[in-house]
Image (cartoon, grey):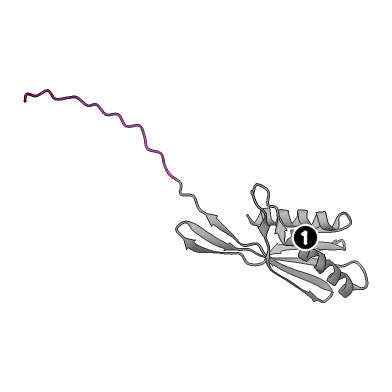
Amino acid sequence: MIHAIIEAISIALDDKFGEGYEIYSEEIRQGLKEPCFFIFCLSPSAKLFFGKRYFRTNPFCIQYFPATDKKQRECLQVAEQMYECLEYLTIDGEDSPMRGTNLKYEVVDGVLNFFVNYDCFIYKMEQQTPMEDLETSTSIKEGGD
């Protein structure tokens, strides 16, 4: 599920910002091409809700590395656009969009850190083993009244 959310975030960012912005979801040790986004899930958790339903908390951080010398200004402009494009995501294979919650951001050392949660319920299906074939024979007992 987390990988599907990362894919949906990437698509939403690409739709909003278009070409010229690289989007990474794996750690880049060198060769980072700015401007770019880096998407990662912070610390997901799951809690039993009821029966076989689990509530999954999926907090994400999307970092933006600006390209201009006016880093603060560029980060603030991008953050405003991210509010709009990350509020609802279309997850591949899902019927309805997933809503982002707890949207907030901060700019630290010239890098935008945009936080959003995509929380959801998961139902764990119980795997059932089908029974083998059972054959029976019956007969009617004739008796007198």
Read off the magenta span.
128-145
Residue 27 visible somewhere in the drawing: no
Q: Which residue is mark 1?
A: 85
Magenta span has 45?
no
Q: Nearer the viewer, residue 27 or 59?
A: 59
Residue, far right: 69
The image quarter containing residue 21 is: bottom right
The image quarter containing residue 84 is: bottom right
Residue found at x 67% / y 53%:
4
Give the SS element for disc 1: helix
Q: Amino acid at mark 1?
A: Cys
Taking 128 as reference, is 132 above or below it?
above
The image quarter containing residue 140 is: top left
Residue found at x 12% / y 23%:
142
Residue found at x 49% / y 63%:
49
Residue, far left: 145
Label 1 CA crowd tier, 10 Å (few <14, some 14–19, many 20+): some
Q: Nearer the viewer, residue 97 or 15?
A: 97
Residue 58 visible somewhere in the drawing: yes
The N terminus lies in which quarter of the figure?
bottom right
Q: Where's residue 71, x and y in %?
A: 88, 73
The C terminus lies in which quarter of the figure?
top left
State left or right for residue 122 relative to residue 42: left
Residue found at x 22% / y 26%:
138
State whether the magenta stretch is mostly helix, strand or loop. loop
Taking 30 as reference, is 123 above or below it?
above
Q: Where's residue 25, x and y in %?
A: 74, 58
Q: Where's residue 26, x and y in %?
A: 74, 59
Q: Where's residue 15, x and y in %?
A: 81, 54
Q: How many marks?
A: 1
